[in-house]
Amino acid sequence: MARNTLIAALSAVPDPMLFVSADGVVASVNAAAEALFGAWIDGRSYATAFRQPALLDALESVLRGAGASETRYSRDDQTGETLFRVLITPMAAQDTGTPGALLHFTDITHLREAEEMRRDFVANVSHELRSPLTAVLGFIETLRGPAREDSEARDRFLGIMEEQALRMNRLVGDLLSLSRVESEERVRPAGEVNLRDVISGVLTTLRPQAEEQGSQMTLEADEGDYLIRGDRDQLTQVFTNLTENALKYGGPGRAVTVRLETGEGRGSMRGPVVRAMVVDRGEGIDPLHLPRLTERFYRVDSHRSREMGGTGLGLAIVKHIVNRHRGRLRIRSEKGKGSTFTVVLPK
Ligand code: ADP
């Protein structure tokens, strides 16, 4: 391929690409590669241009006649590290007749981030399962040994084992919900749901729990039409998770209010919307934590959350369901006064 044709072809590719001639000179650079390395590399030796041993070794072996090769190249700047996969293909420049190498850089930072997230997630799940499992195994051992003939201890230990097994059961249940919700997130629900009915159903189900801790629960709703496009079961899960949290973190004897209103969307949500606010009068959340609250397994106080049977996945599930409904979740909280979780859903 003539040099001009090569340059024209490279410039049509959005990824950084460049050609290194057989004598080791960077001979053709497309615009994306110029943006990545700077225009100065055109005409320089490749050793000056790249400077990373893995890339230099791979390139040298291609220039020495080995077949195509693949390597990684990373760049650090103010926005963090960008990782590229580099494909190096031997290629003859026909105007000179000497073979060179064509380098194609693909940004794979997002793949590495996804891989890191997956690894963190597996580590978190294993960690969450490990302590209840260890407890159950420990008690089995004790029941077989020292507590064998002690019926009082046996009952107590069986009670703890049941609690731990229920905890694992909740975790597995939440993990399954999360994976189901994530896989459906792109498909907007088609059903028609009355949000007011959904929320009164949730409050009826949670009433015994509220009464047990002496907390009042109230639904306040303006006159209005609360029909929205949605998935009834998933919306039930959203308001169950939020109201349960309001009861748990609001604390015993503290009232929980769910307020429903219709209105117009703001900002990126134009058009008619329904707003549902779950309000508690607990101790509130430090603003520092708010942006991370919907991450999986993120808890302000892990010990407290676990003690109250929390899995750390409730708000992550809420966020995915709200996204699927093309809605928004907003969290406002004031230390010492309580928190308000607002779900805005388009009609
Ligand atoms: P968990 O199972 O731990 O309750 P969630 O995902 O539902 O998990 O919530 C994540 C964390 O957010 C909780 O551990 C808690 O620290 C905080 N949180 C959630 N809701 C409230 C609330 N109403 N008031 C104060 N903190 C809350």
Image: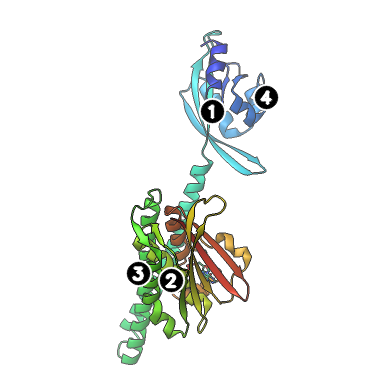
Q: Which residue is mark 3?
A: 169
Q: Amino acid at mark 1?
A: Pro
- Mark 4: secondary structure: helix
Residue with the most extreme right position: 40
Q: Which tag is nearer the camera, tag 4 or tag 1?
A: 1
- Mark 1: secondary structure: loop
Q: Amino acid at mark 4?
A: Ala
Q: Which residue is mark 4?
A: 39
Q: 69 or 12: nearer the eye?
A: 12
Judge left or right: residue 95 versus residue 241: right
Asked where in the image residue 193 lies, by quadrant, the reply is bottom left
Labels 2 and 3: the sequence-earlier one = 2
Instruction: Using a 10 Å C-alpha cutoff, classify the residue at mark 3 as few (fewer than 14 neighbours), some (14 to 19) or many (20 or more).
Output: few
Q: Which residue is mark 1?
A: 14
Residue 51 position in % (x across, y down): 64, 31
Q: Which residue is mark 2?
A: 131
Q: Which tag is nearer the camera, tag 1 or tag 3?
A: 1
Label 1 near ligand 1 (CB < 8 Å) = no
Q: Is residue 299 visible?
A: no
Question: Is the residue under label 1 in contact with that under label 4 (CB below 8 Å)?
Answer: no
What whole-number distance in Å separates the C-alpha atoms at marks 2 and 3? 13 Å
Residue 119 position in % (x across, y down): 46, 53
Labels 4 and 1: the sequence-earlier one = 1
Label 4 near ligand 1 (CB < 8 Å) = no
Locate the C terminus by quadrant: bottom left
What whole-number distance in Å separates the C-alpha atoms at marks 1 and 3? 49 Å
